[in-house]
Amino acid sequence: MKVRLKNINRHSIRFKLTFTLTLIIILTIFTLWFLNRTLLEDYYIHSKINTLGKTYDEVNDIFKNSNDKNTTSNQDKLKLERFVESRNVSIYIIAHTAWFDRSEWVPFDEDKDNGNNKNNEKNERYAQILQLIKGYIFGEVNPQVKSKDLVKSTNNYNIFKTFDPRIESNYVDLIGNLEGGNIVFIRTNLESMRESVEVANKFLAYVGMISVVIASIVMFYISRRFSKPILQLAGISKRMSDLDFDAKYFVTSQDEIGELGSSINTLSEKLEKTISELKSANNELLSDIQNKIQIDEMRKDFLSNVTHELKTPIALIQGYAEGLKDNINDDEDSRDFYCEVIVDEAKKMNEMVKKLLSLNQIESGNNQVNIERFDIVALIQSVLDSAEILIQQKEVLLHFEQKEPIYVWADEYMVEEVVTNYVSNALNHVDGAKIIEIKLIQKEDAVRVAVFNTGANIPEEDLDKIWIKFYKVDKARTREYGGSGIGLSIVKAIMSSLNQECGVINHETGVEFWFELDTKIN
């Protein structure tokens, strides 16, 4: 969760509320940390003093209820061991015939140096404890104690806070008399306490910082509940000033903000209705103007192109018709030739008009697309069979080796029109080796149909323009690329209506036109 501070308004109610609550949390955590740092150690020492006093009372009760003042029963010994472990203290008891070393009784006759390392260690520890006790009781100088402060005194024991310079450690020591005349010495180390206090303070600091961050983020988003309605109303008002009336305030409460939201909604609806009526009138007027301009441009282009394309055949028909009328040639063969020219040019004009009508229908979207599954191989073969006579007349070497059926999803009639135009285009421009090759390249979910013919390449600058109606590549010969100049435009329009791709590629020996169809329905 990332708070985008750059979008926060520092003068907003949301920011002020979040800032105030965060500051209160920071001050609270800082106060706790400061009190911990200044008072926790003293409180811990005071607690340890009470623990030592409590331990003394319980040890004294053990000897008070014991018949043998020089030792303890196994059960009482276990009690002493529990005190050592659970209260983090060391207990030493000096009796008449033995001394208690934290967890066991050691008879004085075993303290002699007999070469046993364990006994030697006990002897050294006994000597240190005895020296400490003498220092407390008789005030003897002890290198183990650099300073000592009496912190509590009773009739039975005294408690001191001491510092051992050898290991730089602070202790709280209790020295006292037990029932039966025994001496007890109880010690606890303060260094572990100080380390615990330091760890606690660090932990509180870390937890405090994390808590401040989390609390700030949580409060920032909670405060949104209070500021969100106001911001929504402000945003709606701003959008209304920009004539945007889509936003509406969702009334969730019956307070002053809810009443204000209802009033703004009513105002927005009335303004939207009034301005919408005005916009509708303006849009209708603008649409009429744009349609008129577009129709005028289309009419001009159409008239210009059709006039240009029909000028030559009309001139031929007129010339030959006048020749027939004036009886220029008396022989039958010449009159037949004139008639054939007139009929041929009339057919060309008729074909051009039909193609123009078909192209106009496709481009206007009035041509209904009927998607079905059919064999593209069979369709191509059918087109080639229809053009077989023309192929033989032009002495073209045709390569179409695909025999296995390939099923595609498209409008079969439209695809047949595309293939027919590509084949016709190839026949019109095949040259050189006079080879026409049709290939089907299968892809994962589609198939590419490529029609290649040998001959001259199309200039690179004209590759994107040959799909335009009546566009001429070879202007010197006044002949458009693609026969009538409409066939490739029809191909482009059909492939666009099928939402498929088509294109052209120049090769070293000729030109390849291609289109793609889906083999799986999408």
Image: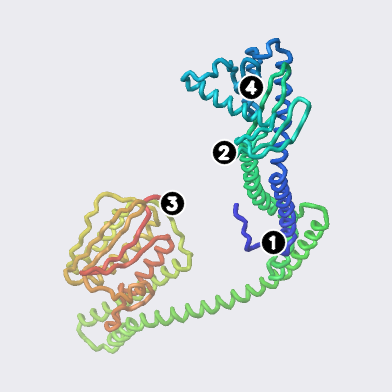
Give yes or no for contact between labels 1 and 2 (Cβ–Cβ under 8 Å): no
Q: Callout 4: 10 Å neighbours few (<14), some, many (20+)?
A: some
Q: Nearer the viewer, residue 115 or 278?
A: 115
Q: Which residue is mark 2?
A: 166
Q: Nearer the viewer, residue 123 or 467?
A: 123
Could you tell me how far apart the alpha carbons at marks 1 and 2 are, in whole angstroms? 80 Å
Q: Which residue is mark 3?
A: 522
Residue 219 position (above or below residue 320): above
Residue type indicated by callout 4: Arg
Q: Callout 1: 10 Å neighbours few (<14), some, many (20+)?
A: some
Q: Quadrant of residue 231?
A: bottom right
Residue at 31% of width from left, 56% of height from top? 379
Can the viewer see residue 447?
yes
Ranked by sequence position, the earlier of labels 3 and 1 is 1
Q: Nearer the viewer, residue 496 or 77?
A: 77
Q: Quadrant of residue 91?
A: top right
Q: How many marks?
A: 4
- Answer with left or right where residue 231 lies relative to residue 326: right
Q: Which residue is mark 4?
A: 82
Give the number of the mark in front: 4 or 3.
4
Could you tell me how far apart the alpha carbons at marks 1 and 4 are, in whole angstroms? 74 Å
Query: Which percent across, then down, holds residue 473?
Result: 31, 78
Ranked by sequence position, the earlier of labels 1 and 2 is 2
Colouring method of the image = rainbow
Q: Which residue is mark 1?
A: 247
Element at label 1 = loop
Query: Which percent across, then down, holds residue 34?
Result: 71, 48
Ranked by sequence position, the earlier of labels 1 and 4 is 4
Give the number of the mark in front: 3 or 1.
1
Ranked by sequence position, the earlier of labels 4 and 3 is 4
Residue type indicated by callout 2: Arg
